[in-house]
Amino acid sequence: MDTKSVRLFVLCAEKLNISAAGRELGLAPAVASARLAKLENLLGADLLRRSTRKVSLSVEGAEFLPFAREILAQEDAAMAALGMSTPVVSGTLRFAAPSTFAQLYIVPILPKFLERHPDVTLDLRLSDTQFDLIEGSFDLALRNLEIADSSLKGRKLGEDRRVLCASPDYLASRGRPQSPEELKDHQLIAFRDLSTRRLISTTGDAAVFDPKSSQSRLVFDDGQSQKIATQAGAGISINSLWSVHEQLQDGSLEVVLPDFMLDQQTALWLVYPKSNVLTAKVRVFITFLLEEVGPVLSRIARWSPQG
């Protein structure tokens, strides 16, 4: 299989423009179209749907795209291993991340990354709903969970310590729980997952908190909205420290049960499909986030209710 034609197809899929993709590779429009047709004949499938107005991926093209990217990654890695070329930091990087975290820590520093790497385009999907990396053809994703999927590999970006918190107004009107058992008498602002949580005290005592036993009249699928509702006095919520540390410092939120912490092994991970060879664009983006965001998260993780 001609990898130059595969590279052309990947560029077409990213730009949805055959002429523009061809120009990037130094090909005239007619030559680019001929190469794509030859690749489609070889595969026995129409990879792109063409009309006078636009180009779009066919079903077969969408299925072939992750394999095409892998072919190119393997070729680049093989050439670099033989010392025959230096990986070029270019192309489109598809990155998925939770919207709340991205808005706070990633989006503000993207201009710095783009300035360093002018040939890289970032295609971001920012949502607190997790995307499937392989089916979505993502190069990289940020996850704030344990990596349970054996098909993924990752680099740890930082801790994801979580705390129970509420607004001063809510605590003044409803009272401050003194033990985990008293949480069932309070309004809980829930975030999708209502699974039972284990709490550990500073003295080593263990307790179990079942969100379903509390009064949950608000359930969110967006972390920022949950935080806003908590500040407005709607109830007690579980939040990542990286999300609420500023509000805890300025007093608009307070830690509930400061002598207890959630016992969990979650962290913030930059994950990618295990089968993928890391391309130069993914490698430099991971390094950038580790250098720019990692130290910030380390400082936040050291925060304590006692200051």
Image (cartoon, helix red, strand yellow):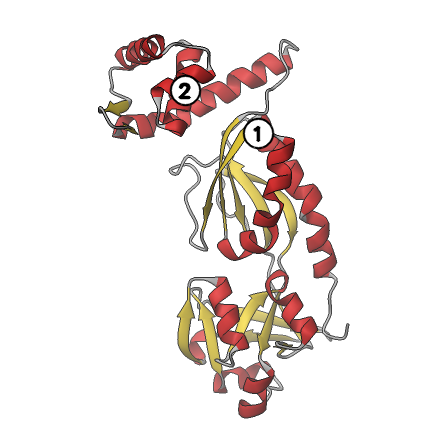
Q: Quadrant of the C terminus?
A: bottom right
Residue 44 percent location from the top left of the image: 24, 15
Residue at 64% x, 79% y is 257
Percent from the top left, x then y, of residue 18? 35, 20
Element type at mark 1: helix
Q: Quadrant of residue 182?
A: bottom right
Q: Which is more toward the observer, 10 or 118?
A: 118
- Left/right of residue 154 with respect to residue 149 in the rendered view: right
Whole-percent x and y of residue 269? 59, 47
Q: Decide: marks 2, 1 in contact (CB < 8 A)?
A: no
Q: Which numbered dot is residue 199?
A: none
Q: Position of residue 119 (x, y in %)?
A: 56, 26
**First in sequence: mark 2 or mark 1?**
2
Residue depicted at x 62% and y 79%: 256
Q: Which mark is residue 21?
A: 2
Q: Amino acid at mark 1?
A: Lys
Crowd band around label 2 with a 10 angstrom C-alpha radius: few (<14), some (14–19), many (20+): many
Task: Check disc 2 and report its element: helix, strand or loop.
Answer: helix
Of residues 119 and 300, the one nearer the viewer is 119
- Asked if residue 117 is positioned above or below residue 9 in the image, the reply reads below
Which residue is denoted by mark 1 in the rendering? Answer: 281
Question: As shown in the figure, which amino acid type bears the numbered disc 2?
Answer: Ala
Label 2 – label 1 distance at C-alpha? 18 Å
Q: Quadrant of the N terminus?
A: top left
| Above or below 148: residue 79 | above
Q: Residues within 10 Å of mark 1 (few under 14, many from 20)?
A: many
Q: Is residue 149 visible?
A: yes
Q: Quadrant of residue 57?
A: top left
Quarter of the image where one finds residue 190: bottom left
User: Is residue 196 in view?
Assistant: no
Q: Does residue 188 sit above or below 127 in this rendering? A: below
